[in-house]
Image: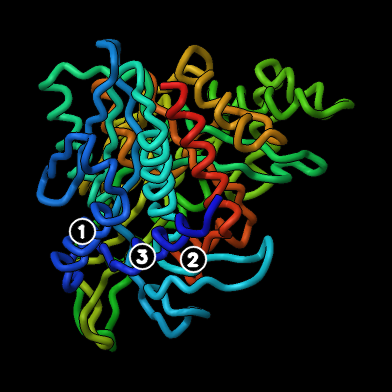
Amino acid sequence: MSDAAVERFRDLLRYPTFSHAGAADVAEAFAGFHAALERHFPLVHETLEREVVAGRSLLYRWRGTGDGPAAVLMAHQDVVAVDDPDRWSHPPFEALLVGEGEERAVWARGALDDKAALGAILEAVESRLAAGFTPAADVYLVFGHDEEAGGTGAEAIVALLGERGVRPWLVIDEGGAVMDGLLPGLGPTAVVGVTEKGAMNVELVVEQSGGHAAIPLPGGSTAVLARAILRLENQPEAPHLIEPTIGLLAALGARMGGVRGWLLRHARTFRGPLARTLAGSSPQLAAMTRTTRAVTQLRGSSSMNVVPERASATLNVRILPGATVASAVADIERVIDDPDVRVRVIEGWDPAPVSPADGPAWEAISASIGDAFPEAAVAPYVMLQASDSRHFAAISEHVYRFLPFDLRQEELQSIHGIDERIRVSTYHRAIAFFEALVARL
């Protein structure tokens, strides 16, 4: 594959398409980014119908030869903030190409999340157009502009498609990846999200008498709040396995011998012990077994010598499928068990429905993974983060979450962090995956 694709990708990465509140020069960044898309992918923009939705989100329609159900390929244009560019090894928006051979990589904010998927989709469609290919039914490209800030663009696109009667047979967005060594001794596994956790932000508020710090009263607002936080910390939800996680364990067990492989293949029978084992193995695996609660913000007095009358904390809660916002709130209230602590939901949404790990959509994705990553097994899993794809549950029962990247642990950790980067070979394989998938549409 020519490095022309990499150069086009690098150009896309140079636009700081932020979506967080207060970001500067956003209009100019998105305008430049949209112009770059037109410049680099001329056949896409000559052939596909393009609409701008909700100000900056992009919806492309590639008309197929028949009138069957459509497919949707998704990515998002926006990137998260860069708090301190001086901490990066290379400037986050210069998209420098660094290294040799397999270590050759593009360093930039958005390299993994999520402009690599966006670029790979467009490279694949441009290539298929150049070859004279037309899909059997309509294909929509959906590129939201504010996934990192709530996904109002994707939500608006779903509403528009719903009004037009579009019911996709396949939706694919960012999500799992090809991971090596998920368990000791295990080869690469492509984990495809068949659902994702719900999320909510909750405020815990305590209002008590305050006053001068020189004469503190017992049982003040901060003490009551601290006790509530410690109760939540010390009483996490009991771990349990839901069906997608059982499917993941069974798929991993199919590649393992011995007692361990047998246990995983029979995960449904041993779901209790396996859930407890996973919960004690790592924070990542534990998060697959329960609804999680994390304290992210604390607020008290604005002065160092004043005991606050009002103390509050924000909890970020990730809700395991099978639970709801309402049940997660009830569980928080049960654990805190204190009428002086008020629990208020700031925002939240329920977990996404579970899409089937079989059938035509799953098989198309699995076969395309096999083409691009022949050494990888395919398994379902629960995506722990939120994505724009959750909105598509309103119009499709086949929504999947997969990034066609073979990621190392340090690369995975750079998402939303410092020194985000993607190896050139990984980007080439992502293009190959989408070319294979488009050929099946």
The location of residue 127, given as percent across then percent down, is 42, 39
CA–CA distance between discs 3 and 2?
16 Å
| Most distant residue in the right direction | 258
Q: Residue at x 26, y 63 (%)?
A: 17
Name the image quarter holding residue 216.
bottom left
Q: Residue at x 73, y 17 (%)?
A: 266
Cβ atoms under marks 3 and 2 closer than 8 Å: no
The location of residue 54, given as percent across then percent down, is 11, 45
Q: Residue at x 81, y 21 (%)?
A: 262
Q: Identity of the amino acid at label 3? A: Asp
Q: Quadrant of the C terminus?
A: top left
CA–CA distance between discs 3 and 1?
11 Å
For residue 307, side relative to residue 255 (left or right): left
Q: Which mark is residue 246?
A: none
Tell me which label, 3 or 2, sits earlier in the chain: 3
Name the image quarter holding residue 268.
top right
Cβ atoms under marks 3 and 1 closer than 8 Å: no
Q: Identity of the amino acid at label 2? A: Glu
Which is in the foreground here, disc 3 or disc 2? 3
In the depicted view, which residue is nearer to us: 425 or 263?
425
For mark 1, give the secondary structure: helix
Q: Is the residue marked by circle 1 packed among few (<14), some (14-19), or many (20+) residues within 10 Å?
A: few
In the depicted view, which residue is nearer to us: 361 or 106?
106
* Residue 334 visible: no
Which is in the foreground here, disc 1 or disc 2? 1
State the residue position of label 3. Answer: 11
Q: Which mark is residue 420?
A: 2
State the residue position of label 1. Answer: 35
Tell me which label, 1 or 2, sits earlier in the chain: 1
